[in-house]
Image (spheres, helix red, strand yellow):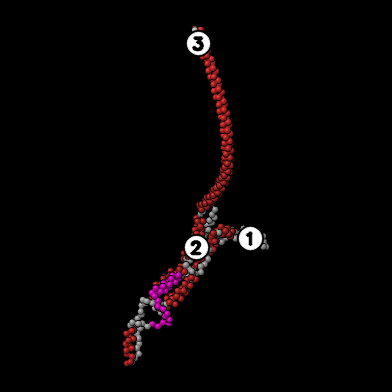
Amino acid sequence: MAELSEQQEQDLGETKQARRSRSGFWFGVIILLIITGLAGAGFYLFTQLRDQQQGLGGEVKGEMSKQIADYQSQLTAIQSQLATLEANVAGKDTHFTKTLADFSQLHNEKLEGTRKELNEAIARLQRQLGKTRGDWLIADAEYLLSVANERLHLVSDVNTTREALEAADQRLRESGDAGTFKVREEIARELSELKSVTVPDIVGVYASIQTLQDRVDKLVLFLPYTGKTLAAPAEIKQPPAAEDQGLLDSAMSQLGGIVTIRHTEHEVKAILTPEEAQFIREQLRVKLEMVKISLVQHNEALFQSSLADAKKWTEQNFTKNADVDSFIAELDRLDNLKIRSQLPDISASLKMLKDIATLRIETDKAMLPAETVVDDKKTNPVEPIKPVETSTPVEAVPSPK
């Protein structure tokens, strides 16, 4: 029994051991299958991952290539813009350089012109400072002669012109320059011509025209108008009244103080309004105003035509009586006046004085004594002719530098 029990225990142990061996074998197989599955799954996953990586790498490469191409096109555009900008900068640089050169040239020209003007002013100042008293007197005389020409030909002021010529002659006499003798002779001739000039009384004529304007309201119009003052009734010489005309004569005598009968040579076609009557008078005043304007302007043609127009207007619109006759007579007197005299030319003395250097040279040549005079038959020298001495010796004044 003991051996049987030991045998059973041994069999049970072997059975347990065999079971353990089987379970270990199957466990190892399962482990191996698991490892193999895991390895296969890992290989599959690795393969998928590698495929995905390759696809992703292609996409990234394509995207990168596309971006690189875009970057290259942008870089090309930027390079073209830079080239255009460089061209613009170069053009502007050239323009600025040319402008600066032109401005520099213009500045140099202005500076050179200013320098020349300054040099001329300095030279003129030096010449002015180097002048003698005689030169200053001659310059003053030249100014007076220019003033005389302006006053005579622009304003027709004969009196001021005569005074300026006399003052210029006095300056030339005080200068003591022998070259001014011919100029003084010309001034004397011009003064004699001015003395024969008749100067019209412009102020008096203007006052006469103003008086005529004041007399316009006293003139009587041809046509009647409202508001016209009635003249005093004339006395009616009645013939010897008959007995049958007593009533008619008494009626006429009563109407005599109310109605004034006036005979006129002109036909009365209308009755003027006060405005029309005033207009006729104002028109006459305007025509006389035109006469005054032409008088001030020394326009003789306009002066005479305006007087003729005023005379014609007066004869056509006003009744001929003593006032109108004296008015027209005054217009005729003004028409006979000459408001612009024939002025002489006094510019010769000024022209001669401006060329004083030539006159000095001619005077110096005339004052030089002849050294020898050769006779036609004899070769003996003749004594030189001495210059005629003037009563008032004149000191020679050097010409201005």
Judged from this view, the residue extending furthest toward the bottom is 243
Tag of residue 322 = none
> Are dots 2 and 1 in contact, CB under 8 Å?
no
Q: Where is residue 382 in the image (x, y as percent from the top left)?
A: 63, 60
Give the spatial CA distance, label 3 vs label 1: 198 Å
The front one of 60 and 214 is: 60
Residue labelled with disc 2: 150
Q: What residue type is labelled 3?
A: Glu
How many other residues sit within 10 Å of disc 1, few (<14), some (14-19) or many (≥20)? few
Placement of 61 over or under 320, stated as above or below? above
Give the spatial CA distance, label 2 vs label 3: 172 Å
The front one of 307 and 273 is: 273
Judged from this view, the residue extending furthest toward the right is 377
N-terminal-most mark, 2 or 3: 3
The front one of 87 and 22 is: 22
Q: What residue type is labelled 2?
A: Glu
N-terminal-most mark, 2 or 1: 2
Judged from this view, the residue extending furthest toward the top is 2
Residue labelled with disc 3: 9
Placement of 282 over or under 100, stated as above or below? below
**At x 36% / y 82%, what residue is drawn?**
260
Q: What element carries label 2?
A: helix
Give the spatial CA distance, label 2 vs label 1: 49 Å
Main SS class of the magenta portion in the image: helix
Q: What residue type is labelled 1?
A: Val
N-terminal-most mark, 3 or 1: 3
Residue labelled with disc 1: 373
**At x 46% / y 64%, what residue is drawn?**
160
The range drawn in magenta is 262-291
Q: Quadrant of residue 379?
A: bottom right
Residue 83 visible in rendering: no
